[in-house]
Image: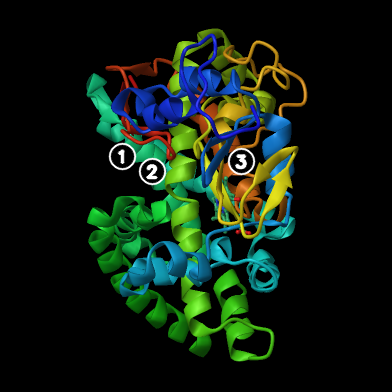
Amino acid sequence: MSTIEQTTTSTGVAPAEAVAALVSRAGRRDPYPLYEALRAHGSVIPVRPGLTVVVGYAEISRALRDNRLRVQDAASYDVIYPRWRSHSSLRGYTDSMLYRNPPDHARMRRLVSSGFTPARVSAMRESVERMVHRLLDRLADLGAGGAPVDYVAEFASRLPIAVISALIGVAEDDQQWFRGMASDLTIALEGITNLGRLGTADQAMDELAGYFGDLIEHRRRHPAGDMLTALVRAHDDGGAGLTHDELVGNLMLLLTAGFETTSFLLGHGLRLAFEHPSQAALLRDDPGRATAYVEEVLRFETPVQATSRWAETGMELLGTPLEGGTKVVLMLGAGNRDPRRFPDPTRFDPDRPDIQPLSFGAGPHFCLGAPLSRMEARIALPLLLRRFPALAAAEPPDHRDRWVGRGLRRFLITVS
Ligand code: HEM
């Protein structure tokens, strides 16, 4: 369909209806039938003037690499919400790479990437293993005698925070506080769609900015071989480095981009193991299967279901005209279930060849933390299954009531 008119197809659901339903309670719980209703209209679908959605794997991949499509930045906030600067959380994020376009984006990304070199990530393997064992010990204590334990609160959300804290250099005693702040701050990752709750994100941003300010000062006086030291140097060198606000903004981004997303991956990973006991048994007996297992979890239950871009000026996207100012929503969760790319997409099958899900995005903004979160899940899931042969769900998992951030809120399990 190449015009904006609202036609219905054999499924009977018009694009605008399907998009609206995605943010309804039922759609948040199960967006997949709505993706199929959209797919019946094509892969790149004009929904209404100013809004186009993309649901095809190949098309999303192309769009994410198309530099005519821009991420939301300060200039675009000025147009859609001129008062946005009154929110410190939005100001903080626009100082980070995820909210910057060329040429700023490449400068920031190059500097921050130094913390994510393959060497630095694999150097963290042993410490991630230690963290996993420590958290498993804790699960064993809490779940002694068959007591139900919340896997999300006690494991899936603790591991990512412990890993990011180690990467950034946050002291262990501060991690619980840090976790609460990170959770509040993620509200602002949804931009201005949740204005009512932005106050909570602003407060977290202000407290974290103070905390990071102290941490930066400490590293300046006591340099270490870590990522924060490298970033502080980039700031202090001036020239092509980072401003103080950009340094803090990118630290906020690292904290929040990698926290809930990885906990969603760990949550889905265990839930799917319970639903597919033969796959769980294979994973337990052969941790070498973890790579394929984790990729299929990422495909099947995409932690970040969508991202968006803006057509700054009029253009054509794979044959579909976009007017300047059009928002393009790239539905990663739909692309990961595109039957042209993944035959029988609703089947959970770690043995499918060449999975390569869209879950970490693609192109210039491809997730910087992908190797780290993959490593966490590949280590954690087999160890969890090995450590507790009697691991079981105590009750069905409680899903978060969100569309974009798809994860579990609570999952009571028994370990013995
Ligand atoms: C399962 C876990 C994760 C998922 C599903 C995920 C997903 C994503 C996605 C989809 C993007 C691209 C957004 C876009 O193009 O609009 C992204 C970007 C990013 N992610 Fe992740 N992420 C995960 C873990 C992490 C971790 C552990 C970190 C860091 C510690 C991290 C840091 C970042 C950063 C810094 C960006 C921005 C890159 C840029 O703008 O150039 N992520 N992530």
Q: Tell me where residue 174 appears, x and y as whole percent.
A: 32, 64
Q: Which residue is mark 3?
A: 374
- Front residue of 389/305: it is 305
- Which numbered disc covers residue 153? 1
215 sits left or right of 61 in the view:
left
Residue 44, by quadrant, is top right
Relative to 267, is 236 above or below? below
| Residue drawn where x is 60% and y is 22% of the image | 41
Relative to 279, is 19 above or below? below
Quarter of the figure with the C terminus:
top left
Q: Residues within 10 Å of mark 1 (few under 14, many from 20)?
A: some
Mark 2 touching mark 1, by CB under 8 A?
A: yes
The amino acid type of the residue labelled 2 equals Ser
Q: Tell me where residue 401 appears, x and y as whole percent.
A: 31, 33
Mark 3 element type: helix
Q: Tell me where residue 134 appears, x and y as whole percent.
A: 42, 44
42 sits left or right of 406 in the view:
right
Mark 2 touching mark 3, by CB under 8 A?
A: no
Mark 1 element type: helix
| Residue drawn where x is 68% and y is 43% of the image | 321
Residue 151, by quadrant, is top left
Q: Is mark 3 within 8 Å of ligand 1?
A: yes
**Could one spot residue 387 in this view of the protein?**
no
- Front residue of 43/371: it is 43
Q: CA distance from mark 2 to mark 3?
A: 15 Å
For marks 2 and 3, the one nearer the N-term is: 2
Q: Which residue is mark 2?
A: 157
The amino acid type of the residue labelled 1 equals Ala
